[in-house]
C-alpha cells in the first residue's frame, strides 16, 4: 500500500500511448496537401501534379511503417513491464515526445528530399527516438521489480545491447550516410523499417527457457 | 509459452485501430475550409459560398460513411480472429495505411470533382484498401490457429471470395467508370457504401450452423 | 448464437465514439490561428490582436461545452442500451457524422459572428444532431431487446418526447431567432448548453421505480 | 440504484480524458511548420532555417512536458476518485477545456517569444488550468462519497492547499515575471514542469497511514 501513489495504471499509460501512436500515424498524411492546378478538369495536369508529390508519398510511407514498427516494439516492451513507476513513465513520455515529433522531420523530408540537411535531421530524430528505447530498457534492467517475473534478466540485457545496435547505431549510420548521398540514407531508413517488420529469432531470447 | 512474444494483445491492436478510424473520420471535415467572403455580414454571399462547397460536402459524406463501413467490416473480421501473429498485425497495418490515406483522395475529389483523374485516384485507393481486406482474409484462412473456433473454414473461404467481388472488383469498376463519366463513378462509390450499410444474409455464412 | 455477427461489441462502439468526441473537442481550438502582428515584440499590438479574436474564443467555448453535453447525453443513452444491432450502430454513426461536422459551422461562426447565415448554419447543424439523438431513441424504444432490462419503457418514451423539445425544437428556435438578431441565437445556443450542464429531475424518469 | 443515471462510468471519463491528452500532446508539433527556403538542395540554408525555429522547438518541449505533468496529476487525482457525479464530470470538462486550449498560447509563444503579452497569456492560461485542478480537489474534498475509502480526508485537504501554491500561484508568479523579463517567465514555466516530473514525499500525504 505504501507507495501506491508512485505507481501508474499500466492500462492508462497504454491507452495514452496508443492514442499518441494512432494520432501520429494518421496525422502524417495531413502533410500531403492537395496540389493546385489551373485547369480544374484537366486530368493530365492533375496526374503530373500527383506524380510531383512522389517524394512526399515515399517519406509518408517510410514514416508510417516506422511508427508501426515503433508501436510493435513498444507493445513488446510493455509486455515485459510488470508495473510503471515514475521513472518508467517519464522514459515513456520522452519516447512519445520523439515519436510525436516525427511528423515534422517527415514533412521536411517530403519538401526537400534532395537536401542533405533534411535527410540528416530525419536520421538524428530517429536515432534519439531509438536511443530512448534502449535507455528505457537499461533503466528497467536495473530495476527487477518493474519487470514481469517471466523475464530472464541476463537475456533481457543481451536484448538491450542488440536494441542499441539495430536502433540508434543504424540510424546514426543512416544519418552519416547522407554525407555520401541522400538516397543512401533513404535506403538505410527504409531498410531498418523493413528489417523490423519481420520477426526474428533473437526476439525470444529474453524469455526464460522452460 | 514458447511463442508468446510473437503474438499481439488483440485489445491493444483494437484500441490502436479504433483510434486510427476515429481520427480519420473526424479529420475528414478539416479539409472543408471556411470560405472567404468580402462583405463580412452579407448573408446571401455566405450562402452562395457555402453552396459552392457542395462537392466538398458530398465527398466528405461519402468518405465518412465509407470509413464507417470499413470499421464495421474490421469489427466483423476481428470477431473472427482469435489471436494476432506478426503477419496478421502487418496486414492490419497495411489496411490502416490505406485507410489513413483516405483524407487525401477525398480532399482531391472535393477540390476537383469534375476531374477524371481525381475520381480515378479515389477509386484506386479504395480498391487497394478493399484488396487488403481480402488478402488479410486469405492469409487468415490458411492459418486456422488464428481463427475463432466458432468459424466454419469452408464458409469463411466462400465469404472471402464474396469480399473480393463486393470490394476491390466493384471499386475497380467504379474507377474505370470515370472514363465514361465522373458522376458514374460517384454513383458506384456511394452505392458500395450504401450496400454495406444494410446487413445481408450472406454475412452469416461464415458461422457454423448448429 | 444465431445472429452473433449482426451485433456489435458495445465496448468497441464506445471506444470509437469516445475517440471521435475527444478529437472533435480538441480540434475545435485549431481553428483559432495565431494572429499576425508587424512589430514582433510589441505587446499592446498583440493584446489588440488577441482581443480581436474574441468572437472565435466565444464560439469555441460554446462548441466545447456543447460537445461535452453531447458526450454526457451519449453516455446516458449508452447506459440504457443493452446491445448494438446494425440499426443502432448506424444511428450512432449518423450522430457522430453531425458531431464531427461541428468544427466547420463553429469556424464559420468564429469568422463571421455578425453574419445571419453563419448563425443559421450553426443552429441547423445542431438541430440535425439533436434530431438524430431523438430518432435514435425512437428507434430503440420500439426494439425492447436492445434496451437494458432496468428501463421502464413508457418512461423512456416520455423521455424521448422531452428530448425532442429540449433538442431539435430549441435549436430550430435558435436558428429562426437569427432572423431577429444573431445575438438572440447566440444566447439560445449558449442557454441550451448551460441548461444541459445541470442535472434535472426529469433525467431519472426512465428508470423503473423500485 | 436510485441515482445511477446521475453517475458516470469512470472508465469512459478516463478514456475520453486520455484521448484529449493524447491528441493535445500530439497536435502541439503541428504548429511547427516546415520552413521555406529558396534553394531546394542547399543544406546550410535549411540548417539556418531550422535554427530559426528554435523558439518554437523550446515552447513545444515546455508544453509537451507540461501536458505530461498534467496527465500525471490527472492520473493521481483519478486514483483518489471513487465515483463521478455531474459536478465532478464538469470540473473535469473545464480542466480539459483549459488543456485543449494549450496549443494556442503555445503557438503564440512560439511565434512571439520576445513579446511580453505572449508570455503573459501562456502563464494566465496555465494558471487557470492549475486553478481548475485545485477547485476540483476542493469540490471533491467536501463530498466524501466521491472519494476512495483509502483516502485520509484531512491529508487530502492539506494536499489541496499544497496544489494551490505549486499550481496557480506559481504560474501567476511566472506570468507577472514577464513584466520584468520574458525569459524569467520561461524559466519559471520550465521550472514548474521539471519540479513535477520528479516525485515528492508530499505526494503520499493523502494516504491513510497504516
Image (cartoon, coloured by chain):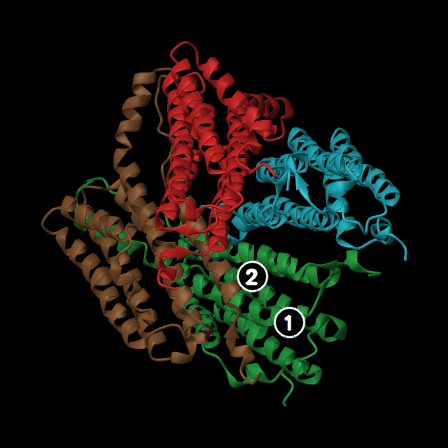
Chain colours: A brown, B red, C cyan, D green
Which one is in front, B147 or A145?
B147
Which label belongs to residue D134? 1
Position of residue B203 relative to residue D155, above or below, is above
Q: Position of residue D42 (x, y in %)?
A: 17, 45
Which one is in front, A110 or A95?
A95
Q: Earlier in the sequence, mark 1 or mark 2?
A: 2
Residue D37 shown left or right of residue B79 in the figure: left
Position of residue B94 relative to residue A136, above or below, is above
Q: Position of residue C177 (x, y in %)?
A: 77, 33
The crowding category of the residue bearing disc 2, from other C-alpha atoms within 10 Å (few below 14, some 14 to 19, many at least 20), is many
Q: Position of residue D54 (x, y in %)?
A: 32, 58
Residue A196 shown left or right of residue B135 in the figure: left
**Nearer mark to the viewer, of 1 and 2:** 1
Position of residue A206 relative to residue A37, above or below, is below
Farthest top residue?
B180
- The residue identified by callout 2 is D125
Which one is in front, C116 or A159?
A159
Is label 1 in a helix, a strand or a loop?
helix
Amino acid at each position: 500500500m505504501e507507495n501506491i501513489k508512485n505507481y501508474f495504471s499500466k492500462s492508462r499509460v497504454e491507452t495514452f500511448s496508443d492514442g499518441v501512436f494512432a494520432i501520429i500515424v494518421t496525422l502524417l498524411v495531413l502533410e500531403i496537401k492537395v496540389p493546385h492546378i489551373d485547369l480544374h478538369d484537366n486530368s493530365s495536369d492533375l496526374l503530373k501534379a500527383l506524380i510531383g508529390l512522389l517524394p512526399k508519398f515515399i517519406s509518408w510511407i517510410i514514416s508510417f511503417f516506422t511508427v508501426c514498427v515503433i508501436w510493435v516494439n513498444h507493445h513488446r516492451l510493455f509486455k515485459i513491464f510488470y508495473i510503471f513507476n515514475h521513472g518508467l513513465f517519464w522514459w515513456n513520455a520522452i519516447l512519445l515526445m520523439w515519436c510525436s515529433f516525427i511528423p515534422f522531420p517527415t514533412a521536411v523530408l517530403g519538401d526537400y528530399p534532395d537536401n542533405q540537411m533534411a535527410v540528416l535531421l530525419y536520421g538524428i530524430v530517429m536515432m534519439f527516438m531509438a536511443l530512448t528505447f534502449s535507455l528505457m530498457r537499461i533503466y528497467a534492467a536495473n530495476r527487477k521489480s518493474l519487470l514481469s517475473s517471466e523475464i530472464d534478466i541476463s537475456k533481457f540485457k543481451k536484448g538491450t545491447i542488440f536494441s542499441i545496435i539495430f536502433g540508434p547505431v543504424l540510424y546514426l549510420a543512416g544519418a552519416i550516410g547522407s554525407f555520401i548521398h541522400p538516397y543512401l540514407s533513404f535506403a538505410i531508413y527504409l531498410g531498418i523499417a523493413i528489417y523490423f517488420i519481420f520477426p526474428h529469432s533473437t526476439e525470444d531470447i529474453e524469455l526464460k527457457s522452460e
